[in-house]
Image (cartoon, grey):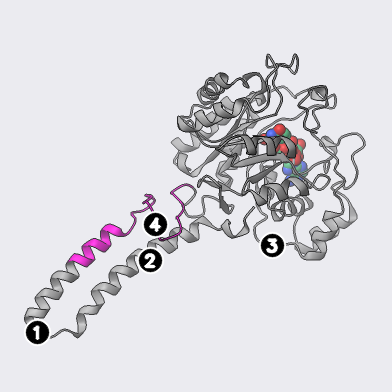
Amino acid sequence: MRSDAVFKCVCTFHRRQSHGAGDARESVGSVESVHTSEDMRLVICVAVLVAVAAAHRAPPHRVHQQAPQHEPPQPPPLLTPQSTCSAPVTRLRDGNFMPRFGFGTWLGFDENQVPIPVTDESVQLAVEMAIDAGYRHIDTASIYHIEDQVGRAVNKKIQEGVVRREELFITTKLWNDAHRREAVVPALRESLQRLNLTYVDLYLIHYPIATETKAFKPYADVDYLQPWPGMVEAHQLKLTKSIGICNYNKTQLQRLWDSHEVKPAVLQIETNLNLQQAELREYCHDNDIAVIGYTPFGSLFPNKLRPGAPPPRVDHPMLVAMAQKYNKTVPQIVLRFNYELGVTPIPKTVTKSRIYENLNIFDFTLDDFDRRDLKNFDTGFRVVDVKFFSDSPYYPF
Ligand SMILES: NC(=O)c1ccc[n+]([C@@H]2O[C@H](COP(=O)([O-])OP(=O)(O)OC[C@H]3O[C@@H](n4cnc5c(N)ncnc54)[C@H](OP(=O)(O)O)[C@@H]3O)[C@@H](O)[C@H]2O)c1
């Protein structure tokens, strides 16, 4: 991720506002040294014209104006309201902006690798709390079966005036049963209906694996490149602002890159202490693809522990000592490490105190020694290995 592209949107917004006002004041101020009445009349006319022009030039509150060609483009109103976005934002390769910290909404697998069923409204409540807390980037997927809950939470917060749609960054994902080119747009339209939104900010291909139904088998004989033109069409139809992929390995990503003119803006992959993904991150960095990191805690907590998972656990002495040193918690240290790798973490929690805890990582920096120690936990161990797909010719791991 390009660190220079990361900035606090609110600063830019204030800079832009004060810059516009400054232009007007400087122009009118030059009247003082003129003495003759003829000159004075002329100058007053000019001054009035300049002031009017400057007033027109100054961007009104929260309204985006096209940046002049010679200036670097400024962020649109997305995420600009003061402090309602608690994370920095980054510019994607397609020009859109993405908050560098998100909120996960998947309930996960049980100990038998079976998806935990949705039985209550806990995700809706969690998303509402997250938006109240300052999260603006929400990650969901059609296969999570909670798009309706995410949509209700988002629309409720918009109606309450807590947030505007343009300030939010909503991601959803194409499931494996809709990989044929012509199936992509209808699948996204169905997601939008469940979300009760007219567009998403990011649409991702969930896996490079195609199936005939929503079940994990049978596979469909559909190459993982096939959905991409459908994704491009979804973007052209303005059903999504950005498009990308999840879980493609480097070879698959390279093949997609080489074969299509429109490139993915984002790759979403598992990234945590045990799986730091140096090779894929480097490829993405070199090609200006943003990396979103899912399952950022890896096997830190007993309830997400995969059998055979290497250390660390949340009570690991080195992590505990580090947390004390920075006056932070172990989960915050882990999220900050992910963030400093250039990854956009999207931790999930339905617990109010953790929603706030996880977001509170933008007031400290890990030092080089600690970063190096944390790097040593990288063993390549994967939590979400979807082994049930391992007999697919396109299994990415
Ligand atoms: N593209 C993909 O293929 C893919 C795959 C997996 C995940 N994802 C996305 O990534 C998101 C995050 O990944 P994930 O849900 O697998 O794992 P995760 O965010 O690493 O871990 C979630 C677990 O950690 C617990 N937790 C969160 N914050 C905590 C804290 N501060 N202290 C203690 N426990 C804490 C949560 O418990 P509580 O909820 O009980 O608080 C939950 O059990 C998902 O929700 C989903 O949106 C995408």
Most extreme residue toward the front is 259
Residue topped by disc 1: 36
Q: Foreground residue, 189 or 392? A: 392
Residue 164 seen anywhere in this rendered image of the structure:
no
Name the chief secondary structure element in magenta. Answer: loop
Residue type, mark 2 in image: His
Choose the circle earlier in sequence order: 3 or 2. 2
Say few, some or many: other residues with alpha carbon within 10 Å of mark 4 (under 14 / 14 to 19 / 20 or more).
few
Separation of residues labelled 3 and 2 (CA atoms):
30 Å
C-alpha separation, residue under disc 1 versus residue under disc 4: 39 Å
Residue 34 placement (x, y as % from top left)? 16, 84
Disc 3 marks which residue?
A: 364
The label shown at residue 69 is 4
> Could one spot residue 112 in this view of the protein?
yes
Secondary structure state at the residue bearing disc 1: loop
**Identity of the amino acid at label 1?**
Thr
Q: Residue at x 71, y 34 (%)?
A: 252
Q: Does the residue labelled 3 lie within 8 Å of ligand 1?
A: no
